[in-house]
Image (spheres, rainbow, N blue to C red):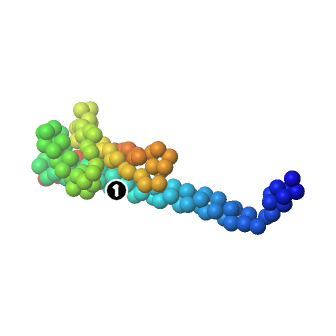
Amino acid sequence: MGRLYKILSNERGSIAAMVAMIMLVMLAIAGLIIDSGFLVYNQLRLDEATNKAATAIVRSVDETASSASNIVFDEEKLLTNSDFFLRTNAPDAVLTGCEIDPEDNGVVYISAKLKSKVHFSKIFGVKEFTLTSKAIGKVSKQTE
């Protein structure tokens, strides 16, 4: 009994155990910060690509329209161009919607998604996050 008490009361190396636990917690926090940084970066990249796609579509329509009252949208061309401009700026993004507001002639809505992979969060069973973005473009009237 005295020998067991002597072993358990010995505090040598206890600091090493506490440092190891603190390092593990710090490593987990650093990993989550890195994953969060990747998510924010990918969200900003997706937002920028979606905005650029909406702007490019609106500009291409602006060039061909003489006034907003007679704008005719070719939906197939609109989808193709939206997807092209989106993938030019974010190759791994997917166009999820491109529509024209029937009530307000000249408004284009574009939405996209991007699957952002994570690195450290795989330990917790999370493999990826799906990020979404929406952009609105308005064709302006051109003066003659």
Q: Quadrant of residue 17?
A: bottom right
Give x and y (percent) for residue 54: 26, 49
The image shows residue 90 at horizontal and vertical percentages of 27, 54
Number of dots carrying numbers: 1
Kindly state the secondary structure of the residue where label 1 is placed. Answer: helix
Percent position (x, y) of residue 46?
A: 33, 52
As drawn, 13 above or below 102: below
Q: Is residue 88 left or right of residue 116?
A: left
Name the residue furthest top: 103
Identify which residue is drawn at 30% across, 44% down: 112
Residue 142 seen anywhere in this rendered image of the structure? no
Say which amino acid is labelled 1: Arg
Q: Position of residue 63 (x, y in %)?
A: 14, 52
Q: Give the left or right position of residue 29, taking residue 57 as reference.
A: right
Q: Is residue 98 visible?
A: yes
Residue found at x 42% / y 57%:
38
Residue at the right extreme, as displayed = 2
Using the image as rendered, state which of residue 8 and residue 26 is in the foreground.
8
Residue sitting at 45 percent across and 45 percent down? 126
Q: Are there few (<14), some (14-19), or many (20+) residues within 10 Å of tag 1? A: some
Judge left or right: residue 94 versus residue 33. Answer: left
| Residue at the spot of label 1 | 45
Q: In the depicted view, which residue is nearer to us: 72 or 39?
A: 39
Quarter of the rendering containing residue 23: bottom right
